[in-house]
Each structure stands twice: as C-alpha cells, then as structure tokens.
Image (cartoon, grey):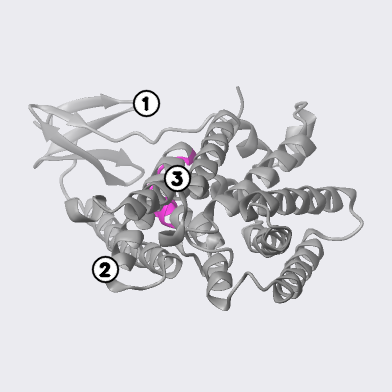
Amino acid sequence: MSDLLSLDFMRQALIAAVLVGLAAPLVGAFLVQRRMSLIGDGIGHVALAGVAVGILTGSMPVLTALAAAVAAAVGVELIRAAGRTSGDIALAVMFYGGIALGVVLISKSSATSPGNLTGYLFGAILTTSRADIVVFAVLAVVVVGVTWVLRHRFFAVANDEEYARAVGLPVMGYNIALSVLTAVTVVVSMRVVGLLLITALMIIPNATAQLVSRSFRSSLAWASLIGVASSVSGVIASFYAETPSGGTIVLLAIATFLVVSVISGLVTRAKRAAHERAERHEHEHGPVCGHPAIPHQDHVDYLHDGHRHAPHADHYDEHDGHAHDGHTHAPHQDTEEVSR
C-alpha cells in the first residue's frame, strides 16, 4: 500500500475517489425518494456534449461539461414543473439529444481519440490531472455542504410536494437546487466512474444502506460510507487488475449490495424464528413468577434465560435486548426530523 501511495497519480486518483464516493450517494438518496433515479444518466449524456464543446474550443472540458449539465438539469425541472410534458419525456429528450450532439461534435475534433472518449464515458481516473482534482474538490465540497445543510427540506419536498407547499416551502427552488447538485455530482464523477455509470454510484449504495439502517439519517451515513469504500477499493483493485476504474467501482458496489442482501435476509429469518419461539413460550410471566420485571415504555418486560419477554395479546414477544449486569439494553429506532 505504501508503494501505491508513493505514486503521485495514484494519490490523486484516491482523493478523487473519496470525493466522488462521498458526494454521489448523498445526492442519490433524494433522487431515490423522488423516484428520479435515472436523471443522472440523462444529465451525463448532456455533459458529454459539454465535454465535446470544451475539446473543440480548446477550453477545459470539466467546466464546459458543468455548464451543459447544469443547464440541462434546470431545463428538465422547469419543463416538468410547467406540466407541458412529463418528466420521463423530458429526460428522454435530454438523454438522446445530449449523447447525439456529443458524438457529432467529438467526431469533428482531431484532438480526441476513441480511448479518450471511453475515459469520459466509463471513467479513466488514473489520467486525472492535478487541475482536475482541484476543480473536483471544490465542486464536491459544495455538493456535500449544500446537501447536508438542506437535507431536511430536500427530504420533505421529495416525500410530499403538496404538503411541502402547504407549509410554505419553496418546492420549485429546492427541486432546482437538487437538480443542479445532481449535475455537479455527475461532472465531478465523470473521470472516476464515467458518465454512463455515475447513476450506479448514486443509487446502489443507497439501496444497500436501506437494508441496514433504521432511519433516513442513518441511511445517508451508511450510503456515504459504502460509496467511499466502493470507490477507494475499486480504484486500488483497478490499478492492480488493470481494469477500468468505473466498471470496477460499480461491480464492487453491486457485490456489496448482494452480500448485504443475503445477510439481511438471513437475519430477518432468524428474527422471525425467534418470534415464533417466543409465541410458543409456555411459561406464564407475572408479578410472582420469580423472573425480574423491567419497566419498558408502557408495559413490563420479564427477564428469562438471558432474554427479555413482553406480554403481547395471548403470547409473549421476544425483544432484542440482552441481559447485562442485571439490566437489559434494547436498541431504539431513531426518527428523522423532516423540517426545522
């Protein structure tokens, strides 16, 4: 690992991976809530047209891609809000129009080889320059900061726009802000996972996080952690395996999702079996049964053989608390405040 960090381009690649792994799942969480998971794909195709403009004009492709992506994100949101056409149709127009324009413009440039185009589409993190890292770092800090500050309002608007309007939230403004953050995230990620794969890094870590989290707040934390782990591990693996960084990162994220899904399914089955055993509990607990009684919210639990049993209708439920030094400790699910 020390040999890896001694290489300047690998240090830059790992920094970029951390930035993307942190930012993409944060924004993706709210896209999932809005059922607009594919907007990243559409914006990514328009960003390709921006890259082509940058190459043709000799300017920095990252900046021209950012301008094109932001313009497309705002345009789609305005069209969707105006009701002139559905959001899906607007995304389709952006999807095909952007990639068509990008391919046509790039074909007119002699400065771009097919390999360079593949790097933008599927990621080429090892070719990321120091200037790119500086731009990516600034954009990633903006994305993470704004998303974290507005997370409660984004959550409220994503879950129920009508209610958000009723309580006075500027729904249009927050939707446009989220679309712009998505566009910025796409541009930040294009050299790491590629314009065609960025949506996977937005969505898959959130799908995995929902399997292990108990609230939206903890889901955000888990998604970011999984995103960073997948990105960093993918960059390291792609270096040694000589594979594209974008595809490697996405495959690791998918593998993590599959492993967590299996483990989560096994845990659910184990809890269901424990509940069935609790329902068949033959001992009848009461004030004189001899087992310690522990007040818990609006009822009383009884400690029995290291487990805590709670009366429920005509049976006893077995809680997750465990006896420790004569006490029980039970996890409590926290709730996410959607407005401040």
Q: Mark 1 or 2 closer to N-term?
A: 2
Residue labelled with disc 2: 240
Disc 2 or 3, which lies upstream in sequence?
3
Quadrant position of the N terminus in the picture: bottom left
- The residue indicated by pointer 1 is 298
Q: Badge 2: how crowded within 10 Å, few (<14), some, or many (20+)?
A: few
Q: Residue at x 54, y 73 (%)?
A: 118
Q: Is residue 227 visible?
A: yes
The answer to whether mark 1 and mark 3 are in CB contact below 8 A is no
- In the picture, measured across the screen, residue 53 lies left or right of residue 281, that is right
Where residue 87 sits, quadrant-wise, is bottom right
Dot in front, 2 or 3: 2
Q: Is residue 239 above or below residue 69?
A: below
> Could you say where residue 13 lies in the image, as x and y percent from the top left?
39, 53
**Amino acid type assigned to the residue bearing label 1 in the image:** Asp
Residue 162: give x, y in percent of width and height. 77, 39
Of residues 280 and 2, the one nearer the viewer is 2
Residue found at the far right of this picture: 84
Are the residues at dot 2 and dot 3 in contact (C-beta closer than 8 Å)?
Answer: no
Q: Amino acid at mark 2?
A: Tyr
Secondary structure under tag 1 reads: loop
How far is mark 1 from mark 2, CA to CA? 57 Å
Q: Residue 119: x and y, percent?
A: 52, 68
Q: CA distance from mark 2 to mark 3?
A: 21 Å
Residue range of the region highlighted in magenta in the rendering: 208-216
Residue 82 relative to residue 55: left or right: right
Mark 3 sits on what residue? 19
Near mark 3 (Cα within 10 A), the count class, few <14, some 14-19 or many ≥20, is many
Quadrant of the snapshot with the C terminus = top right
